[in-house]
Structure formats: C-alpha cells, structure tokens
Image (spheres, helix red, strand yellow):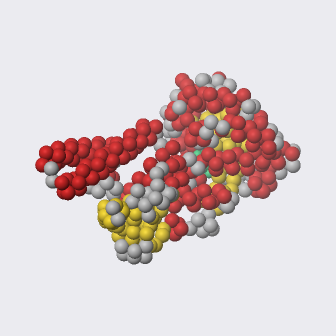
Amino acid sequence: MDPIEFQTTFDTDQYIFSEGDPGDCAYIIDTGMVEVSLEKDGRRHVMATLTKGDILGEMAIIDRQPRSASARAIVPTVVTAIPLDYISQKIEQSDPTVRMFLRLAMARYRDMNARLGQVFDELSHLQEDATVGTYASTTMELKSVMSQFEEMQKRIDTAVSSPSTAANPAMFGEQTLRETKNQIVEEKLLSTALAQKQFRLHYQPIIDLASNTIAGCEALVRWNHPSGELLGPLHFIPLAESSGMIVDLGYWIAEEACQFQSRLCNDFQQEIAVSINLSARQFEDQFLVATLGDIMDRTGARRDLVKFEITESLLMDNPELATQSLQQLKDAGVKLAIDDFGTGYSSFSYLHRFPFDTLKIDRVFVSAMARSEKSNQIVRSLVNLSHDLGMDVVAEGIESEREAEIMREYQTGYGQGFYFARPVTEAEFVKLLSQPRIDLAG
Ligand code: C2E
Ligand code: CA
Ligand code: CA
C-alpha cells in the first residue's frame, strides 16, 4: 500500500468527524488547523483549536465509544490516520502494566470529564439564579476537581516520560510523532508484502567438514522489494518482530521451507535437513507447535529432517515457556538447534535443561580465532562440551580455508559460511547438491 493512502486532505469547513460517528481512527495533524466543538442547547461550543503535530480523535478509539465531539478543518488540512485495528492490536500487544495503566488513566479521565461537565452545568445555572452559597461550594468543587486533574496529568507525564518526551515540553516531540508515522507506514508495507508474496527464501548449505559434502541447509528470508532491491532480513525482521507480524511471516517461511524439504526427499531423493529460524516472539503464539505440526503434515516434510533454530534470548527471557514449547516441538519429532551461541548470555549451565540436538557457534568466535589464542581455546572447549552433552556442532561464518582447517582439526563436524557457499535460490541449491563435493566459493 502506498504510504500516501494514510494521509487525507480536508478542505476548509469540511468535517473530519461528527458527534455520534463511530470512532474508527485517530488523527495526527500534518498541516493545517482543526476546530473541535460540541453542540449543546442548540449552540456550538468550541473546545479546542488544534494545529500541526496535535492528535485528535484518540478518546473514542481507546474508549470504543462513538465520537463525543466534532472536528472540522478551518483551513485546508492534511492528517495522517491511525486506524482503530492498529491501535487495538498495539494495546493488546503491550506490556500488561502499560495496558492496565492506560485503562486506569482513561477511566479516571472519563470520570474527571463527567465531574467537570457537572460543575460547568451548575455554574451555568448559577449565572441564572446567582445563589452566593451554592456559588462558593461549586467554586471549591471546581478547584478540587482541577487540582486532581493536574495531579493526574503530572503522574501520566512522569509515567510516560522518556528522554525524547522529557526533552520536549510538548507531550509528544516531533521525533515521537515522526517515529509513530514511519512505523505505521512500514508495518503496513510489510503486511502488504506478505499478502502480495514479495518474500523469498534462500538456502545456505551446511557442510559436513569431514567429506566436504552438503548435509543440510538453513532457510534465510529475503524481501523482493517493489523497488527492485532484494532486502536482507536485518532490514525487516526487527520490525516484523516488534509489530508481531513475525508470527504470520514465520508461518509462511515454515511452509515454504517445509515444502522444499519435502521436494528434496521426494523429487531429488536427497535426505537433506532444512533449518528454519524461529524468533522468540513466535513462541508467544499459543498455537505455534500445533500450527507447525499442521504445516509439516500438509507439506509432507520429513519431521526428522526439519530443524528449528532459536537463540538464547528465548531461553533467558522466558525459561518456562521455552522449556514447555521446546519439549513439545521435540515430542513432535523435529530437531532443535541453539543459534548464535556465544553472543548472548551463553551459559552451559542451562543448556542441558533444553533438548537441543545442535549447537551453532557464532561467527564472532570463528573469525576471532585467527587473532586470539583465547578464542581458539573457547571454540575447542565449546566443541568438546557440546559433544559431551550429545549435541552436533555447526561453526557459523567460515570465510577461509584456514578457518575450515582449524574447525576440522577440532572435530567440529559441520560448518557454514561464505567459504563454502553463500545463501542461494532453491534452483541453485539443487544444482550444488548434484556435485559430489562442494565447489569452494573462495
Ligand atoms: P543467522 O540465523 O545467524 O543466519 C546466518 C546469517 O549469517 C545469514 O545472514 C547469512 O547470510 C550470514 N552468513 C553466512 N555465512 C557467512 C559468512 O561466512 N560471513 C558472514 N559475514 N556472514 C555469513 P542473513 O541472511 O542476513 O540473516 C541474518 C539474520 O536474520 C539471521 O541470522 C537470523 O537471525 C535472521 N533471519 C534470517 N532469516 C530468518 C527467518 O526466516 N526467520 C527469522 N525469524 N529470522 C531470520
Ligand atoms: Ca540461524
Ligand atoms: Ca546464527
């Protein structure tokens, strides 16, 4: 979807929304000016005049109530829409404490608004009957409501203050607004990319170091961007993870990779394992294990030749969930690998608690071996310890004959890296398979 679709232009006097309309969008004003008003006793009362960078219509969205006021452009105005579905999804995905806080703040805000409304009603009656005693008590009530309101505002400010908002006296700095808008547009582009099948999988061979033959491959996702560029995962996986889109994208990746695994066995008579990366975020989906099982059944993939790679962050952030899901995957008959070992908290003390078949030594250790004797020792110990724990080892990021040689010497078992082959298309991978030994890319 073109980013421009999120922006709408309103002419002078055109209504953005009216009282009673369903609250389906909040808006950020890009340029122009908007008057927010309320109809009461046949008269229109102006409540606020908003300009560039201000937000409107958010109450009805968070509250899920119809619009309680009208908004009209008073000069030609451009706004960026933030759809209800988008915000609802964000709120559901946010930390439970933030969610609770938001609900609490909204409940208080609503309550305070109702009380302010009552006080204003009383004040307008007072103008009519001018009773001094009532006037004094109403003024006191008004003061108390106002001071409570200010107190709450202060608390919200403290709770939401971040370096960017603290530095800017306005509630939302330019930067926050820009980031919000970019995120909305990019997430939309990403989900469109999935719907329009713009993602591709490449496969990087995993080599049996003793024989220099292909033992398996790792599926690595790319985005065939409409601009013509083939984007690597580091350009979009972080956003797919933070937006939750990785769940759907992950299923698409698993489906593609399992289809390929099935073809390798059935069409090419090759017993080649296919490794699939799983992000920690995907484990938040309670149907993960069941859905992956369905995908393997549907595609006819050989479960013992499907391997899921996960990183340490999953084990560290949520050990209970990890233990449970990993065991379920293991019970489903697939293989498991711990990826990027050595880059995170890397502790062998917890490794034996999880049912891994393979340990992948991160490329930073492999590339540091030439420079540091310590790295050599670490790699050697890692290999030995892994084997003692019954795991295979894959050395990642082998870029030279020297590194391959050392890994062979340490009996590492398997290697992966540009020295052997880069990630390639499915057709190119099949061609590599037809060679008796891997042609070295150099
Ligand atoms: P990773 O799982 O560690 O994947 C290996 C990365 O190292 C790949 O980068 C690969 O191209 C690169 N690589 C392989 N050999 C060499 C080498 O000899 N030298 C150097 N410098 N690099 C080498 P890529 O494809 O850019 O993927 C980066 C990361 O993106 C992956 O790291 C993985 O964390 C993530 N990723 C890739 N595909 C997927 C996916 O399908 N799902 C998820 N959740 N994450 C993925
Ligand atoms: Ca990996
Ligand atoms: Ca890795």
Q: Residue at x 51, y 61 (%)?
A: 185
Q: Is residue 74 above or below residue 419?
A: below
Q: Nearer the viewer, residue 197 or 411?
A: 197
Q: Residue furthest front?
A: 129
Image x and y of residue 374, in percent:
50, 34
Image x and y of residue 117, in percent:
30, 51
Tell me if I can see residue 193 in this picture: yes
Q: Residue at x 31, y 64 (%)?
A: 45
Question: In the displayed structure, does residue 125 sit left or right of residue 326?
Answer: left
Q: Residue at x 53, y 36 (%)?
A: 313
- The quadrant in which the N terminus is found is bottom right
Query: Which image quadrant is residue 210 in?
Result: top right
Q: Residue at x 80, y 45 (%)?
A: 299
Tell me if I can see residue 214 in this picture: no
Q: Nearer the viewer, residue 334 or 66?
A: 66
Question: In the displayed structure, does residue 91 sit left or right of residue 130?
Answer: right
Image x and y of residue 169, in percent:
26, 55
Q: Nearer the viewer, residue 332 or 161?
A: 161
Q: Residue furthest left?
A: 132
Q: Is residue 440 above or below residue 226?
A: above
Image x and y of residue 7, in percent:
48, 68
